[in-house]
Image (cartoon, rainbow, N blue to C red):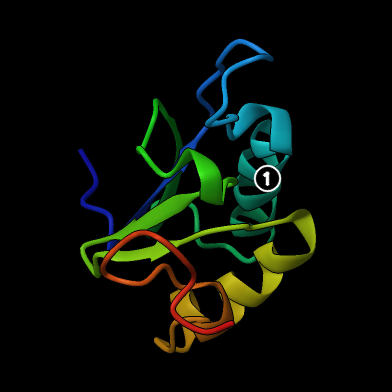
Amino acid sequence: MPRFERHIFICTNVRPRDNPKGCCSAKGSEAVAAKFKEELHKRGLKGKIRANKAGCLDQCELGVSLVVYPDGVWYGRVTLDDVNEIIESHLIAGKPVERLRVADDWKQPAVM
């Protein structure tokens, strides 16, 4: 069984429409997860970096949210347009995308 260098967990949780927290699924997380998988495959990173759908990561207000392990870097408000930047900057070059990072208190992005 391969050991991945990095593992991305993308929240694809679904909540009722009237839930005040919202949910990542309603913000396009399925498409974000699919794009990560597609782009990693295109770059030949399949087997080195794994992207998985995840249940609730408890950052609903900041969705689409995801976490990269083993780095422990959390991202919020991720869109399809951000996927390539995260791959190129963080996953390949090792430099997290600061504008999307979630602050340690999980209330807001680290950089606004």
The residue shown at (61%, 41%) is 33
* Left or right: 78 as drawn, with respect to 107: right
The residue shown at (62%, 57%) is 77
Q: Nearer the viewer, residue 112 or 97?
A: 112
Residue under label 1, please give it: 32
Task: Give the vertical position of 28 relative to 89 (above or below).
Answer: above
Query: How many marks can you see?
Result: 1
Give the image quarter of residue 95. bottom left
* Amino acid residing under circle 1: Val
Which quadrant does the C terminus fall into?
A: bottom right
Number of residues whose C-alpha sits closer than 10 Å to that of mark 1, classed few (under 14), some (14–19) or many (20 or more): many
Q: Nearer the viewer, residue 103 or 28?
A: 103
Q: Position of residue 5 (x, y in %)?
A: 28, 64
Which quadrant does the N terminus fall into?
A: top left
Q: Position of residue 66 (x, y in %)?
A: 45, 51
Q: Nearer the viewer, residue 103 or 40?
A: 103
Disc 1 on helix, strand or loop?
helix
* Left or right: 68 as drawn, with respect to 79: left
The residue shown at (57%, 46%) is 63
Task: Give the vertical position of 101 relative to 55 (above or below).
Answer: below
Give the image quarter of residue 58. top left
Q: Nearer the viewer, residue 57 or 4?
A: 57
